[in-house]
Image: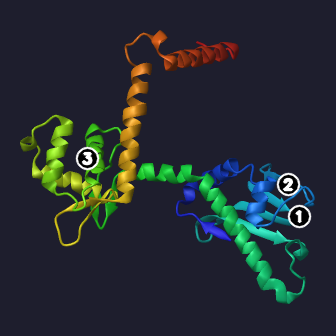
Amino acid sequence: MTQILDRPLSGRIFFEEIIRENLDIGRPDMVQLIFERRVTKKTPGRFRTRVLTDGVIPSLHVDYKNSRIKQYFKQVPEVSEVGARTETTINNTRDFYIGKRLCNLPALRQVGFQANRRLIEVERLSHDCAVGKEAMHQLNRSVVVNRQRASALRTTDLRVLALWHVLVWFRLLPGGFANRNLREQLAVLTGQMPTTITPGRMTYDLRRLRPHGMIERIPKTHRYRVTEFGLRAALFFTRVHARLYRPAVAEVIGKSPPEISDLCRHFEKLEEEIDRRIQRAKLAA
């Protein structure tokens, strides 16, 4: 089974992160999940995760009795494609209570295919950070949808944060919202009068939100509704900005005395340790 990656340049980095995040995949509790077989103290074989990197293409190996799953990074120069290759080798069919005759080949193929799928599912769940990273990049860079370009939604832009606050409110409206509703609420959050925000400016903001998947137009109307992705992204980034970014920046970079901030004390310890290591390595000017 080969998963072809749509971004070949980052394929090697992606696969190395998969290996790093799944070093415990060979534990008995994980192996019995992947092969759908109960593992007890009497189950023969060594349960371990082996990662081979020295002089070869990095590969991940998981053993169960006489069977083995191998994953490695596969490159196909002829078609300029890269992928994550997953191979399952069954050396003893009796490990799965299947006979050795050729008529049992479809059953063995099903066992191998299901083991591959379960392993990939486990890795997908543990590698959601990469998916989240891609979603964050999607918001923080411009996109082109149906030849319409939409500028980035910078997560630290105060106007974007105000827009997201409004989306959280409007998610509760069963009939959606219109340009005028957005203008009135945005004026409250930004400390402006509604008359100072032009309809054209609101149209620009709506055109930014739609291609990024934050909102969608209600068919045959000029009203919009917040998408599920839009609600989750708006809730997350507004809460992170209010509860993490602002308080932390005030402690680290603000003018308050360092002794009243635990975060500042930790930063000072880090800087002192860096200075010590520089002196020890004789790298100081």
Q: Looking at the image, which is closer to me, 133 or 278?
A: 133
Q: Against 195, is 204 above or below?
A: below
Q: Looking at the image, which is closer to me, 79 or 120?
A: 120
Q: Which mark is residue 47?
A: 2
Give the label, 3 or 1, closer to the camera. 3
Q: Identify the image quadrant of the C terminus.
A: top right
In which quarter of the view is residue 9 placed? bottom right
Q: Residue furthest left?
A: 195
Residue 144 percent coordinates (x, y): 32, 61
Mark 3 vs 1, N-terminal side: 1
Q: Looking at the image, which is closer to me, 173 or 82?
A: 173
What residue is pinned by disc 1? 65
Residue 274 percent coordinates (x, y): 61, 18
Q: Secondary structure at mark 3?
A: helix
In which quarter of the view is residue 120 placed? bottom right
For the residue marked with disc 2, what is the amino acid? Phe
State whether residue 283 appears in this view: no
Mark 2 vs 3, N-terminal side: 2
* Residue at image location 80% in from the left, 66% down from the top: 37
What residue is pinned by disc 3? 166
For the residue marked with disc 1, what is the amino acid? Lys
Q: Compute the Cα span from label 2 to label 1.
A: 9 Å
Describe residue 92's horizontal placement relative to residue 244 as left or right. right
